[in-house]
Image (spheres, rainbow, N blue to C red):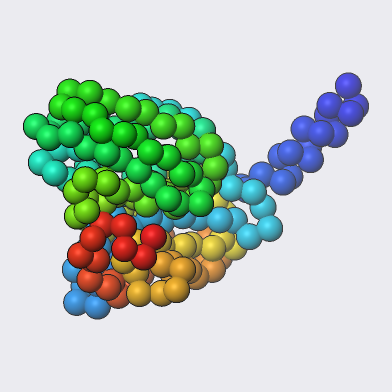
């Protein structure tokens, strides 16, 4: 019993204390919101909260485009790739975190892949080069995709934390920018100004 109590106290002390609400805005140099950026929070010296394996997760092929363009999914998630186009698609990825190939499948058919390792998964269609999408696979429960350039974390951790913004077209070697903030109680807003490169002519270029 004492060992269980000690283990519980150790777990509580290692877990990040929750603070207030953190709003992160991602904008370009003209102040326009940047969609599809992924914002993550990593408490310094403490573990992040685990990502929940809720679902379902899907990346649709519709109108010759992958929807959504960027998805955040937890490690271990099963992602479906339904085809709603009148033509067949051949979905694949050469990304180190997950290599896969879903050979030609037709309208109203679907294929699924389990993503069991954290990382960025660049997805393309072997038939239609301009189709591209990205999966941000993570164990971090503080990871969100920006909509209209904004993310909101209502349960942000308290204490020093690294805030990272990732976007597939961000003009940095790692496609990320970061800053460390002393987060505390109450609400806080932070803005990241990022510069994006033009999307590649072919969806998988550079990945």
* Quadrant housing the C terminus: bottom left
* Quadrant housing the N terminus: top right
Q: Position of residue 186 (x, y in %)?
A: 45, 54
Q: Position of residue 161 (x, y in %)?
A: 56, 61
Residue 31 placement: quadrant: bottom left
Q: Residue at x 41, y 32 (%)?
A: 113
> Which of 16 and 204 lies nearest the eye of the viewer?
204
Q: Is residue 52 visible?
A: no
Q: Residue at x 51, y 48 (%)?
A: 97
> Which of 156 and 167 lies nearest the eye of the viewer?
167
* Left or right: 30 in relation to 36: left
Q: Position of residue 125 (x, y in %)?
A: 26, 45
Residue 168 placement: quadrant: bottom left
* Left or right: 122 in relation to 29: right
Q: Residue at x 54, y 68 (%)?
A: 180
> Which of 70 and 32 lies nearest the eye of the viewer?
70
Residue lying farthest bottom?
A: 29
82 relative to 46, above or below: above
* Left or right: 43 in relation to 165: right
Q: Residue at x 14, y 44 (%)?
A: 64
């Amino acid at each position: 019993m004492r060992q269980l109590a000690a283990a519980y106290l150790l777990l509580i002390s290692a877990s990040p204390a929750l603070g207030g609400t953190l709003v992160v805005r991602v904008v370009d140099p003209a102040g326009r919101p940047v969609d599809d950026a992924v914002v993550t929070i990593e408490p310094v010296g403490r573990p992040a909260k685990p990502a929940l394996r809720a679902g379902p997760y899907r990346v649709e092929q519709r109108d010759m485009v992958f929807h959504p363009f960027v998805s955040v999914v937890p490690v271990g998630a099963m992602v479906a790739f339904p085809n709603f186009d009148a033509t067949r698609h051949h979905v694949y990825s050469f990304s180190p975190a997950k290599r896969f190939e879903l050979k030609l499948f037709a309208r109203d058919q679907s294929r699924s892949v389990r993503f069991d390792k954290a990382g960025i998964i660049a997805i393309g269609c072997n038939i239609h080069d301009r189709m591209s999408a990205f999966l941000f696979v993570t164990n971090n429960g503080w990871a969100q995709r920006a909509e209209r350039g904004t993310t909101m974390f209502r349960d942000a951790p308290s204490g020093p934390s690294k805030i990272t913004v990732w976007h597939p077209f961000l003009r940095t070697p790692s496609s990320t920018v970061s800053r460390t903030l002393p987060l505390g109680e109450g609400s806080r807003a932070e803005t990241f100004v990022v510069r994006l490169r033009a999307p590649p002519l072919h969806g998988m270029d550079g990945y």
